[in-house]
Amino acid sequence: MKLLWIFAHPEPASLNSSLRGEVIRALRAHRHEVVESDLYAMGWKATVDRADFPPTAAGRLSIGDAQESAYRTGGLGADIRAEHEKIAWADTLVFHFPLWWFGPPAILKGWLDRVLVQGFAFGVKDEHGRTRRYGDGGLAGKRALVITSVGARRSSFGPRGIHGFVNDVLFPLHHGTFWYTGMDALPPFVVYGADRFTEPDFTACADALRERVLGLESDPPLPFRPERGGDYDDDLVLLPGVAPGATGIAAHYAVDPANVPATPR
């Protein structure tokens, strides 16, 4: 495998940093290739602004159009272009972060905003001029894995847990980012009770994560419905005979999402 490991944690001695080190060493020992983007160590700029683009005529900045124009003319910042090269090289993208306020840290959100630009990751047309998305797109053929940690217990992120089912919490990333740009979203690896880890907990978690990541090539992706798979009408609404009675997030899985695992520690 060729993995791009995008890491977002400010503390080099954190649980997540330690897990990352253990797993990347194992990957390299098994002759897999790993390139890292350690966003805090890189001092990654997390906000989209005019500085990301070449000087243009004064006026309203349309972010998507400006991104695509700069991408096509080579005018994006050097930091963004470097990430594009890493993505083009990789077959698997790993997004490793602690879950803060039910989402990734701002620095990782900023990586998504600045790197997955129009014309590169989304807004790409097919030979008929149709926009490629939801199972197709600029990143089609790649796979994406979330590794995240939470302080809460596993049960509270279950299908009836107070925090919401963890796959629902991660739906904006899995479906709205990975699947939208054409990547297969793999079931996440979630570290529960991260604030209460003991040494035996760490050993067991590192072993489980090592085994999971080394086996990614055989992992089935989350079973999302492709936009052009015959389940949606021209208004991008599920056809009446598809998942009748189902609404919301659950309707966009080809199977009951409660039966789709999130790998526990």
Image (spheres, grey):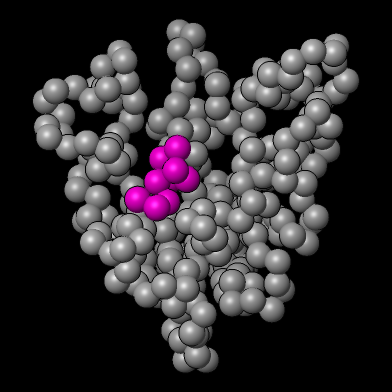
Q: Does the magenta stretch include residue 174?
A: yes
Q: In the depicted view, which residue is nearer to us: 60 or 170?
A: 60
Task: State which quadrant residue 188 falls in.
Answer: bottom left
Left-right relation of 136 to 255:
right
Can the viewer see residue 121? yes
Image point (41%, 72%), residue name:
152
Up-down relation of residue 176 to residue 120 (above or below): below
Left-right relation of 120 to 207:
right
Left-right relation of 249 to 94:
left
Up-down relation of residue 233 to residue 205 (above or below): above
Image point (47%, 73%), residue name:
151
Task: State which quadrant residue 5 falls in.
Answer: bottom right
Q: Does the magenta stretch include residue 100?
A: no
Up-down relation of residue 141 to residue 64 (above or below): below
Q: Percent position (x, y) of residue 64?
A: 64, 22
Say how many tags the image has. Answer: 0
Q: In the depicted view, which residue is nearer to us: 190 or 90?
A: 190
Taking the view exactly as shown, the residue that stands out farthest to the top is: 128
Q: Percent position (x, y) of residue 179?
A: 43, 37
Q: Percent position (x, y) of residue 228?
A: 32, 22
Q: Is the magenta stretch mostly helix, strand or loop?
A: helix
Q: What's the magenta region?
A: 168-176
Task: State which quadrant residue 115 falls in.
Answer: top right
Q: In the depicted view, which residue is nearer to us: 128 or 30?
A: 128
**The N terminus lies in quadrant:** bottom right
